[in-house]
Amino acid sequence: MDVVVDEKILGSETEADISEWLVEEGSQVAEGQSLAELETSKVQVEVPAPMTGVVTFLAAEGDVIEPGAVIARIA
């Protein structure tokens, strides 16, 4: 399952930076666990895991992402 950063996560912002991954790539994560911190011009928000599984990153810390971006995959 793709981890998508949507407008609900970003609020009114149009883009954000991945400031930090909170888990290691390849690790087992639980549904709802925070995966990454995103930084917008106004706030920092966390991206939750949509399901339990093993995470693979598709974006790196420092990458600028927009709504709809897929930043990781969980299998």
Image: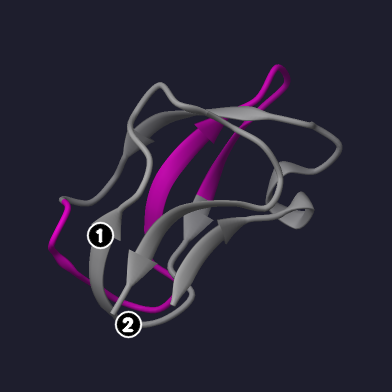
Is residue 3 one of those drawn in magenta?
no
x and y percentages locating residue 69 in the rendered image = 59, 48
Element type where label 1 sits in the image = strand
Residue 27, above or below 75: above
The residue sitting at 17% across, 53% down in the picture is 25
41 or 26: nearer the eye? 26
x and y percentages locating residue 57 in the rendered image = 29, 51
3 or 23: nearer the eye? 3
Q: Furthest-top residue in view?
A: 41
Tag shown at residue 52: 2
Q: As drawn, is 24 to the left or to the right of 62?
A: left
Is residue 28 one of those drawn in magenta?
yes
**Amino acid at dot 2:** Thr
50 or 72: nearer the eye? 72
The quadrant of the image that shows the C terminus is: bottom left
Element type where label 2 sits in the image = loop
Callout 1 crowding tier (Cα within 10 Å): few <14, some 14–19, many ≥20: some
The residue labelled by disc 1 is 56
Q: As drawn, is 8 to the left or to the right of 70?
A: right
x and y percentages locating residue 31 in the rendered image = 40, 78
x and y percentages locating residue 49 in the rendered image = 43, 68
The residue sitting at 34% across, 28% down in the picture is 61
What stretch of residues is rendered in magenta? Answer: 25-46
